[in-house]
Amino acid sequence: MGVQVKEPIAFHRITIRSLRQAITPKRLLQQMLEVGRPFELVPLTPLLVIALATVADVLAPHLQFNRLLGAAPALAAAMWPVAGTLAIGLMALITAIGLAAANHDLSQTPGLFTLLAITAITLAATYASRVRQHRERTLDEVRTVAETAQRVLLRPLPQHFGYVDIELLYQAAAAHARIGGDFYEVFQTPHGVRLIIGDVRGKGLPAVEAASVVLSSFRVNARDVPDLPDLAARLETSMNQYCEDLAGDDAMERFITVLLVEIPAGEPIARLVNCGHPAPLLLHDGEVREVEPSAPSPPINMAALLGDHYQVDTIPFTVGDRLLLYTDGVSESRDLTGTFYPLVQRVRRWSSAGPRQLLDQLHHDLRAYVSGTRDDDVAALVAHRVAPGDWEHRQRD
């Protein structure tokens, strides 16, 4: 009962305070400015409703267009602040009184009912505007938290890691989301530049949590672990421990595909361990080829079922070569007919483009290829080996 009593009292105080602030034209203009861009058509819709209803009622008073004035505060609740919504409602009420007086209908039952309806709609719209603004503030706070989580989980990558340049493309599938189940990381270690790109089975917050576990393990072990198979085993152990602490039967079904890459400084090669992840593309001298693993390695959290053997593949990776790493949000995108995105054929068109231009072309082409709303995260990363002279020059800078 206490909540039921306090809420009308609080609402009554807000209404009186808002009326004091909203009844002057100067205050009304200030409320219009608070909307954002006041001279666009959408924020002006409530005022247009009042104007059109007034003109129509003057031209055809017998049709009682003044009853449409109640739509003005109802529309204002969706786009105006509390005081602005109350001002619109007050303006509609005053206009209705004037029209009723001009038509000699002010003391009649239909006229009184119209005024009562506009008053009730205005009060309800004012409360709705207050609720909307509260939710918008809450959404802004949630977005701020999401942006902070993004900076922690998926930190912005430097463009240069010594003798390797990095360019990145990332887009979460969830509406307005900044993070998802796809992840990446790059470190310069005593063993060379080490990269990881991965994709968690599933979506939403559980996928983000699982991604954070693997990323944390990679960040802790990437510099110290001597080889990639040992690094993959550390990721497996971390994920196993995480799943042991989870309640539910789906913990063991939460696996992660991962691609680990090591680019040593003194050798023109790259080492790869592919744990069930889509095969990367090697761009060399205008040619594009998929780097398929010579033997399968288990996805993270699947070693107990598939074995814990992690196969290392070594490929030539000289100055000027680029390695395109991506998740299945790229390779498994479909068009209207259900056809998968022809990644290799499309990348061949852009084989001479720089890393940033390559990812920009890929992004635009994916958006044009996929129809409707994307239902999977997209992550792509290009590692470009540069000349030692460029590396030394950057170190001096």
Image (cartoon, helix red, strand yellow):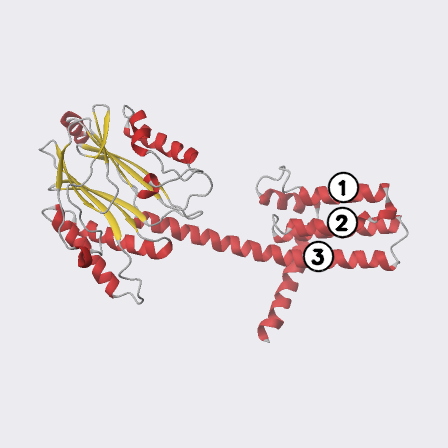
Q: Residue under circle 2? A: 68
Q: Secondary structure at mark 1?
A: helix
Report the residue that reaches farthest toward the right: 104
x and y percentages locating residue 175 in the rendered image? 44, 47
Q: Looking at this view, is 236 or 57 the one in front? A: 236
Q: Residues within 10 Å of mark 3 (few under 14, many from 20)?
A: some
Q: Residue at x 86, y 43 (%)?
A: 60
Q: Is residue 187 above or below residue 346?
A: below
Name the amino acid, label 2: Leu
Please state which amino acid type lies under the numbered disc 1.
Leu
| Place of residue 103 in the rendered image (x, y in percent of width and height, measured from the top left) | 89, 49
Q: Disc 3 on helix, strand or loop?
A: helix
Mark 3 vs 1, N-terminal side: 1
Q: Nearer the viewer, residue 199 or 75?
A: 199
Circles 2, 1 touching at the beta carbon (< 8 Å): yes
Residue at the spot of label 3: 121
Mark earlier in primary sequence (2, 1): 1
Query: In this view of the protein, can residue 350 be seen by the observer?
Result: no
